[in-house]
Amino acid sequence: MRILLVNPNTTRSMTEKAAVAARAVAGPMTEIEAATSLMGPASIEGHYDGALALPGLLDEIRKGEAAGAQAAIIACFDDTGLDAARAMAGIPIVGICESALVTAGFLAQRFTVVTTLERSRVLIEDLAARYGLGHRVKVRAADIPVLELEDEGSGALDKLRRQIERALEEDGAEAIVLGCAGMADLAYALQQAYHVPVIDGVSAAIKQAEALIAQKLTTSKRGSYASPLPKNYTGAMSVFAPE
Amino acid sequence: MRILLVNPNTTRSMTEKAAVAARAVAGPMTEIEAATSLMGPASIEGHYDGALALPGLLDEIRKGEAAGAQAAIIACFDDTGLDAARAMAGIPIVGICESALVTAGFLAQRFTVVTTLERSRVLIEDLAARYGLGHRVKVRAADIPVLELEDEGSGALDKLRRQIERALEEDGAEAIVLGCAGMADLAYALQQAYHVPVIDGVSAAIKQAEALIAQKLTTSKRGSYASPLPKNYTGAMSVFAPE
Amino acid sequence: MRILLVNPNTTRSMTEKAAVAARAVAGPMTEIEAATSLMGPASIEGHYDGALALPGLLDEIRKGEAAGAQAAIIACFDDTGLDAARAMAGIPIVGICESALVTAGFLAQRFTVVTTLERSRVLIEDLAARYGLGHRVKVRAADIPVLELEDEGSGALDKLRRQIERALEEDGAEAIVLGCAGMADLAYALQQAYHVPVIDGVSAAIKQAEALIAQKLTTSKRGSYASPLPKNYTGAMSVFAPE
Amino acid sequence: MRILLVNPNTTRSMTEKAAVAARAVAGPMTEIEAATSLMGPASIEGHYDGALALPGLLDEIRKGEAAGAQAAIIACFDDTGLDAARAMAGIPIVGICESALVTAGFLAQRFTVVTTLERSRVLIEDLAARYGLGHRVKVRAADIPVLELEDEGSGALDKLRRQIERALEEDGAEAIVLGCAGMADLAYALQQAYHVPVIDGVSAAIKQAEALIAQKLTTSKRGSYASPLPKNYTGAMSVFAPE
Amino acid sequence: MRILLVNPNTTRSMTEKAAVAARAVAGPMTEIEAATSLMGPASIEGHYDGALALPGLLDEIRKGEAAGAQAAIIACFDDTGLDAARAMAGIPIVGICESALVTAGFLAQRFTVVTTLERSRVLIEDLAARYGLGHRVKVRAADIPVLELEDEGSGALDKLRRQIERALEEDGAEAIVLGCAGMADLAYALQQAYHVPVIDGVSAAIKQAEALIAQKLTTSKRGSYASPLPKNYTGAMSVFAPE
Amino acid sequence: MRILLVNPNTTRSMTEKAAVAARAVAGPMTEIEAATSLMGPASIEGHYDGALALPGLLDEIRKGEAAGAQAAIIACFDDTGLDAARAMAGIPIVGICESALVTAGFLAQRFTVVTTLERSRVLIEDLAARYGLGHRVKVRAADIPVLELEDEGSGALDKLRRQIERALEEDGAEAIVLGCAGMADLAYALQQAYHVPVIDGVSAAIKQAEALIAQKLTTSKRGSYASPLPKNYTGAMSVFAPE
């Protein structure tokens, strides 16, 4: 199996960290190809960054599919561009927020997502509601700029721990979901420390992608995700015109 | 008052039709500036077109705000880029789907949106749910490619009428919402024909924009729509980097 | 445009304060006619007062429509009698709670209503749910009897400020909605003080009424709001019998 | 036990029919006192009639409580004035829609309400949603003016049967709820004919009222239903001023 | 009327306490037959105990129906086996959680269930959601093992009081529901102490059972609760095979 | 990896068919152990069969865990006993309905479950709602007794096809979920025939079980699924007493 892991921001160190987490859970026959977006923001913090990450993200998926990937993962917890990618591609597309929440749902009735910045909190609450888990999920922001996760001396881990502890005490959380691709390396140690399931979205997404490939399933092309109709695209976007 | 009306697709005739509808309902002190996206798809039909319309759309809003617009309207019924634009801009941003649904809510308990293609049906159902109106709204697709609305001989109006009639008979619709910016010229005649409110999103959005300006209200910069943080943007997107 | 602003309680000073707020945002061609109910409670605090305010409210709307009003506003945050008025009248009817919540929805993802008494808190929560905004709105009561808002020395403003501060700190509120027509004069100063949108329902409703008139839209008479059927009405209510 | 059964419209024959149904299910120690409103509409068909029925309804409940009633039933399927009566009275107040839906919930997972006129359909759908049963209930209108139920030759029963049959075939209904107090006499025969539970709201409400009295339970006066505050009431409503 | 009250755990003292509560509210013509399960757990604390209580519970209901009971009550607040019993039996089946919540709904807009152990909290939240009352109900666990309720010196009552007080102060609770059959003896004294309705599920269920019998209503056998189809059952379960 | 696949009914041919489907999608390092319940119904058709299947099901899971299984799958589309098994076991437990719906959610926005009998339709609708997918899922019953699926000449496949065709035409289904473990062999051929994703729950569950094992995740023992407390169990159930 060949799975494409796309980091939709342009920071290569995050891609590498996610790729390590991905390879740690992938099956023996799975090859992970990690790609970093070539255009767009260095990190995705809020709706604006997310919007401008889309062309770079879609470009990587298109290239990856052409090169033989059998599924693609969007490694940003906002599930940026998930619907657009599903409409574009012939291969299944998997989001890390969707995967993490679904995985937590097999293990616990109530769980808390700990994410980076306050501006992402409601965005993730709304994703959880879209995936039908609004009544089971709480979201907390740990006040960590995304790129601080790349810097060991930043104190980010302490902030994360503090919110996990509050989730267990105040939210009745039965499991914890790490709400940023940049936290992928921390899940197992936190699980050992707190004795509850701690879910990383990148790991969860790899297994969902493998599951879809093994079942010979791909995105429905009937209705919501019908292939883009051929039409003219103008300017810098003309390279994306569907044929 | 200066209101910017952005057509996020690149088809100028649709911009002009929307601008006519906008000026017909605007107050005497309101100046409508209509802009057409310079990059992206010729029409927005589904999630993929919507994603690639974002850079062009955000660019027009940014330029419009710099030129003195006091509010901006996104003239696509998918409310493409609404959240990103709200995070970016200092002026209020108004979507035409949101405006149309909210307007219908003042007039009827149950209503039906008639949109163009089947691929947009669930997308609009999900928007209605996001705006809290899922239980009051049905959505029907009339099987009309968007650009056929620009062609009088296409039979598009007949298809639209057929779905309105089914909505009244089968859905218990008490009002009709036209689910595409390209239908803005048809609302009043259909209202006269069917004796129920027929709402056009462009017209509705102009009035919402005027309302916000008159009340001296703009997007909250606390939480979800906090201003983008300064960071590096790469490649073709580098022009969008927040400062 | 002629818009009728009905205060459904019998306290004229509240009507006047609401009229001032209304005129401050109304368009240059809009004439506001403010009416005070002639029968019923001096303030509306809970369901019982609301029920007994209905005949007086409906009477003012009927007279106002006969005198040429093109839309009517019910200036009580409980949206008292909204459905009955819509069924009765040929002109559009606008509630101030509905208008305020809808307006906040264009500006923020999460917001808090600060109302007067605890007994109104759940009532407004249920209105928000009815309007589909239950997941986005919290409601707080500031423990202010309605008529204390008419008395500058009452300490009402301090109580209101305290709840706004708690909303910002504890609720994650991105905007504030003032939950009583009697607070209409306070919105702008509070907005300046707290740097978040502060929405007054009377102001919001004026703009919604103007919007409906400009779009030539009125309440659907198909289904829920069909005109009352002619029938016998008995006793003190006989003056209200539909013909 | 003394239970007050209030018909909030002014048609005595409907009161009598409801009283017959009530007495047929009441316990051996229960005394039913049936009262007809003295002011307001001859039938309640839609929101406007409902609003103008309130003073007459509240007046009967106030008199009944003063005369020793231990609970009161509002015998209109719109549950007209339920909240206002609960705030006013010291005795428990029971609605017939609420009672019927709750009773059906003990017997079936999905059920259909068959009501009189189309204008009441959405109103009852919204009541069902308020009572939390929106996902289990469908509502059908049989196109029967309320007072036709008082006229045996009107064909009303045939129309009712037709909708019951459609509910069983098309809605997957497992039980039927009769959606008008004026249908109280028909339930048992329809149940025998269709071999599914057929619930009459008046009968259901009597048993709920007895249940509350036997359990020594009455409306909470904390929060939503706190007693009306003393204040001035003006004009024809002054007789209702709380002390 | 003959009503079967089944305690689905095997602790006779709990059955007796429930029977006392039941007889205190039953009508003069009602005979309560109390049965204790002969196989299964001594108390039901969580999903596992609940599952293993089912054969014993269903056996008692089957025997009770054969012996002439006209309705049966399942006296565990988890409403254990409610759907299975409804499918099996020809008589109406009433759960005590369902009855208590429904009863509270006639008295208050917001209420709190105080139950025994944390492991039952989410289970009851999910029941409340299933019954459509999720938005009106909060659930608190008092950290009381079920059988401590049988031991006066255990301090259980103090723990219960503490959670009731927090519910009134922090949850805005307008009424309290006792979330365990073993608390049936405490309701009235707590109601006197706290001046809000305090509802016991066993008492509530008796009145619902009487209500259904008096209305000649029983479980629908169409759809969800159709009678079990004849088939082979194997091993220890073979005595339960439907014929 | 060792995964236990439990058929909670006692029909071995169904177990074998499910095992074939399971092995077809399992990874190269996965060993599937298929177990058939030794006590209970020959098929699970409705709530009563489901309840009496629990002891046999839990027994197989207990034995399987003791024998070294690292995850267990409950191969009945009702997700019978899922919560009880999660509380009992130390290994993750996966339901086939939950797995199938979650899998469909990665591929389509709207989908239809085609199940066997009408009595299971609402049960599955309620499961979908519990998993948060109520707004995306429709359920159809094909009127096929479960054991007819074991008989090639029964016409079951034709009935199934007819409902799939109606789902595509009438429901706007973008994907199909097969709603019975006994349909596991049909998925791929139906997918080829209808050109939409067709999901089998057994296959989906195997991949979810593998995913959880690979991620070193198991059921949270905090809150809802805390381990059963030691206590006395009586009679035929005494073998299940937790220690």
Image (tube, coloured by chain):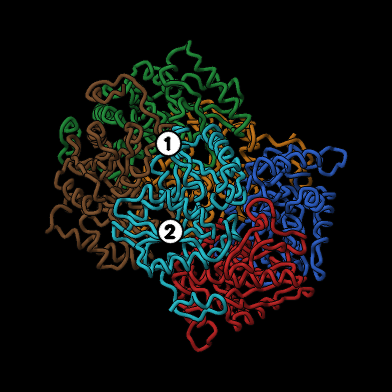
Chain colours: A orange, B blue, C red, D cyan, E brown, F green
The residue under label 2 is: D34
Task: Identify the residue at the far bottom of this view.
Answer: C153
Where C168 falls versus A67 (above or below)? below
* Foreground disc of the pair 1, 2: 2
Task: Identify the residue at the far right of this view.
Answer: B153
| Disc 1 residue crowd, few under 14, some 14–19, many 20+, Cα 10 Å | many
Quarter of the figure with residue E52: top left
Position of residue B88 in the picture relative to residue E167 (left or right): right
The amino acid on which the numbered mark 2 sits, given as a three-letter code, is Ala
In this figure, what is the number of numbered marks?
2
Label of residue A25 in the image: 1
Q: Give the chain letter at badge 2.
A: D
Q: Same chain for labels 1 and 2? Say yes or no.
A: no
What's the residue at 50%, 27% (across, down)? F141
Taking the image as drawn, is residue A207 in sight? no
What's the residue at 77%, 53% (across, down)? B7
Position of residue E189 in the picture relative to residue D96 (left or right): left
Where F232 falls versus E176 (above or below)? above
Q: CA distance from mark 1 to mark 2?
A: 72 Å
Residue B132 location, x and y as percent? Answer: 57, 53
SS label for mark 2: strand
Label of residue F243 in the image: none
| Residue closer to the observer: C235 or C159 | C235
The amino acid on which the numbered mark 1 sits, given as a three-letter code, is Val
Q: Are marks 1 and 2 in contact (CB under 8 Å)?
A: no
| Disc 2 residue crowd, few under 14, some 14–19, many 20+, Cα 10 Å | many
